[in-house]
Amino acid sequence: MRRAVLELENAASAAAERPLFDLDLTLGEGDAVVVLGLPGAGKTSLLRMIAGLDALSTGVLRLFGEDLATLSFAAARSLRDRVAVVFERGGIWANRTTTENLVLPVAYRTNVPIDALAASPRLREILDALGLGDVSDRPTAALDDSERRRVLLARALFAEPEILLFDEPQSGLSRAHQRAIASLLEVERRQRALTILFTDNDGRVEPYEADRPIVMHERRIVPGAVRLPERAMTELKRETAP
């Protein structure tokens, strides 16, 4: 049995508006799990809560077997540093180059010299795998939306997280770039036992590999569900109809 790296038990978020509730979830080392749900179902809020951006009001969140509520701030921060999150629209330093966006967070956390990180083979491998090799020295303000989206993923992977939270990986990307990302994530799972939790609106997750789905509906995880409820599918078809 795979070691549990993320556990939610009867958890609820402390958000004043539209909180999450009834959250039970376990991810094992190397798992890839997709969170299905319509816009507004709570998928991004779930990632925010796991990442520590939104607090819990009740329940338990364990990372790597440790209940975060019982730890000091420094100890909890150390565990959260092993988790990376890529939102559909994330923060990026527009006045920095692509390479600087990748290496600066790692340099701040580890005190490894910036030049050493910028020269690392892993940096080049990630940039090339995501089609960013030609823009490594370009300020990110000059990149298009697709390139910036891939820079955010490259930055997350360069930090070598043990858990990756990836919001809407298909959004704003060509099929070729989706396939490149899917291939890179599979390599990360095989070589580093990376655990991946990603979100999707409609269940058309290909080319991304998932071991299993979970379903969110009306701000909760639906126990045992593997696809969107019929009413939700009807709403989705209505929203996407020409």
Image (tube, rainbow, N blue to C red):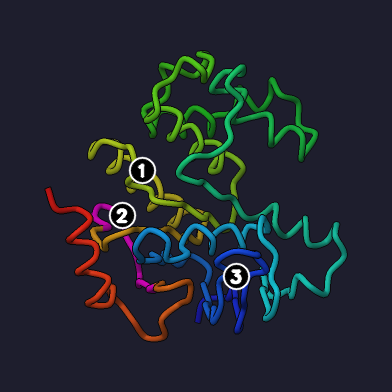
Residues at discs 1 and 2 in contact (Cβ within 8 Å): yes
Quadrant of the rendered image containing residue 35: bottom left
Q: Amino acid at mark 2?
A: Tyr
Residue 44: percent from left, percent from top = 49, 57
Quadrant of the rendered image containing residue 91: top right
Residue drawn at x 38%, y 58% as measured from the top left: 39
Circle 2: element type: loop
Quadrant of the rendered image containing residue 113: top right
The stretch drawn in magenta includes residue 224: no
Q: Report how far apart the C-alphas of labels 2 and 3 lie in the structure.
A: 21 Å
Residue 221: percent from left, percent from top = 45, 77
Q: Amino acid at mark 3?
A: Val
Residue 181 shows which numbered tag? 1
Q: Which comes before the other along the chain, label 2 or label 3? A: 3
Q: Which comes before the other along the chain, label 1 or label 2? A: 1
Magenta segment, which residues? 205-215
Circle 1: element type: helix
Q: Amino acid at mark 1?
A: Ile
Circle 3: element type: strand
Residue 75: percent from left, percent from top = 83, 61
Judging by the rendered image, the residue that carries numbered circle 3 is: 5
